[in-house]
Amino acid sequence: MKLNLKIWRQKNASTKGKIQDYKIANVDPDMSFLEMMDVLNEEMVEKGEEPVEFDHDCREGICGSCNLQINGKPHGPDTGVSTCQLHMRKFKDGDTIVIEPFRAKAFPVIKDLIVDRSALDRIQQAGGYISVNTSGTTQDANAIPIPKEDADAAFYSATCIQCGACVAACKNASAMLFTAARVSQFALLPQGQVEATNRVLAMVEQMDKEGFGACTNTGACEIECPKGISLENIARLNREYLKASVT
Amino acid sequence: MAKSALLKSSLAKKYWMAFTGLFLCTFLVGHLLGNLQLLLPVSEAARDQFNEYALFMTTNPLVMILSYVTYISILFHAIDGVILTYNNRKARPQGYVSFKPSTNSTWASRNMGLLGTVIFVFIVLHMNAFWAEMKFGGLDNTVYTTGGGESVKDLYTLTLSTFQDSTYGLLFVIIYVLSMAAIAFHLLHGFSSGFQTLGVNHPRYNGFIRKLGYGFAILVPLAFAIIPIYIHFVLENVLEKI
C-alpha cells in the first residue's frame, strides 16, 4: 500500500504547529497503525529527519497510551479499538490519512502528536478511590455480597483505559464519560458508598477546573470509546451529583 | 460545597437547562391547545370564544403566575444556554483540521445553540406581534362586548388578519413555519437529552422516552405550523367576513 500522510508537527507546547505532508510506500495491510508510524519514523531517521513523536506503550489496547485522531475520528475509522489495534487493512491503497493530536484546552500538546492527559489523572485523584486500611486486618473484598448485575456493571465501567477518546470526540471537549465511568465503578459497589458524596462533588469540581466542556448528550463519546463505555454512566453521574448536591 | 455546587458547576447548569427545557415542553402543549381554536370556521362565535379565552389567559391569577414562570424559564434557558455554549467553545481553543462529527452524533445535538438562537429571535418577533399588542394597549380600540357579555380585546381578528395580510401574510407564514422547524429540531435532541441530564436512563425506558421525544418533536411543532398555513390558504378572510 502507498499512502499520503498529513501529520501534525509541533516542536513543543509554546510553538505553533502545522500539518506536514509525508509519503509512505510498502505498507503491509496487516500492519497495525502504530507499526506503520514506526516504519515512517525509521525512514525519517535514516534520512536524518526528526521522527514523529506519538504516545504508545502496551500496543494491546489495554494501557490507554495511544491516542491519535485519525481522519477526524479518535483512534481512527474502526470501532471498539484503540489506535494500536487499528490495522492498515481498514485503509485503501492511495488513501490520504490526516493524523492529529487529541484536541482540548485541558490536553495541551507536548510535542507533535503527544498531548498531556494528566488532567484525567487529577480528576481520578480528586476522589476516584476508596480509603481502606491496609494494616493487615483488611476485610476480604469477597466477603461482601454483591449482586452479579452490579458487579458486572461496575466492571464494565472500570474497563475505561483513560485514553481520552471521549474528550477528543466531544464537540465540547467534555470529560463527562471518563468522569462518569470512574464515579460509576464505585457508586455501583457497597465499598464505594461511604465516600460517595464527596467523591462525586470533588471529581466534578476538578473536571470543571481542568477546563473541560459540559455534556450536550450528543453521544459521540460512547460511539468513539474503544471500550464502549455507555452513556448510562453519565446518567448515573448526573444522579449521583444531584443526590450529593441536595443532601 | 454542596450549595455552591448546585449553582456553579457545569452539571448544575445542565440540570437547570433540562428542568426549564422540559417545563417549556409542557408550556408548548398548553399554548397549542389554545391555538387550535383558530382552526374553527370564521364566525362571531369563534371570535368570541377565542377572545374570551385570551382574556382568561391574561387575567386569571393562576395562569398569570404560570406565565411569569414561563417567561423566567425562557430567559433562564437562553442565558444558561449562552453561558454553556461559550464555555464549551472555550474547551477546545484549537480545532481539528479533520473532524467528522456527523459519523457519531446528530446535527441537531451539535447545533442546539444555533437552533435556540433562531427560536429566541422568533419568540421576540412573536411576542412583539401578539403579546405586546394585547398587553400594552395596542388593541384598546378593538374592545367589544361578546355574546356572553364579556368585554374583550379583539386578538382573534389581529391574529387572523396578520397571517391573511395581502402584502406580508405569506412572509409571516413562512417565518412561522421555519421557526417551528427549528423548534422541531431543537426538541428532537432536547426532549430525550433533558431526561438523560436529570439522570433518567434505564434500558427499560430509554426506547419509550426516545420515541415519545421524537413524536413530541414532530407532532407539536407540526400542529403549530398547520395553523398559520390554514389561516392563510384555507380560512375565509376575517376582515371581509366579520
Image (cartoon, rainbow, N blue to C red):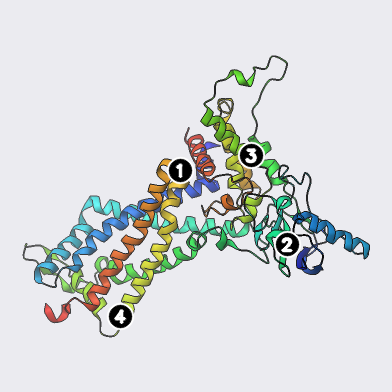
Alpha carbon distance from label 2 to label 3: 26 Å
Q: Is residue B68 left or right of residue B84?
A: left
Instruction: Return the x and y of residue A146 as percentages of the image width and height.
Output: 54, 24
Is residue B57 depicted above or below B199 in this figure?
below
Between tags 2 and 4, which lies in front?
A: 2
Q: Which residue is painted at 27% across and 74% down in the image? A: B229
Q: Secondary structure at mark 4?
A: helix
Between tags 4 and 1, which lies in front?
A: 1
- Residue A159, disc: 3
- Residue B201, disc: 1
Q: Secondary structure at mark 3?
A: loop
Q: Secondary structure at mark 1?
A: loop
Q: Secondary structure at mark 2?
A: strand
Q: Are marks 2 and 3 on the same chain?
A: yes
Q: Are marks 3 and 4 on the same chain?
A: no
Instruction: Return the x and y of residue A65 as percentages of the image width and height.
Output: 74, 47
Mark 4 vs 1, N-terminal side: 4
What residue is shown with label 2? A99
Q: Are marks 2 and 4 on the same chain?
A: no
Whether tag 4 and tag 1 are in contact, CB under 8 A, the answer is no
Q: Which residue is painted at 64% across and 39% down in the image? A: A159
Amino acid type shown at disc 3: Thr
Alpha carbon distance from label 4 to label 1: 43 Å
Q: Is residue B227 left or right of residue A114?
A: left
Alpha carbon distance from label 3 to label 1: 20 Å
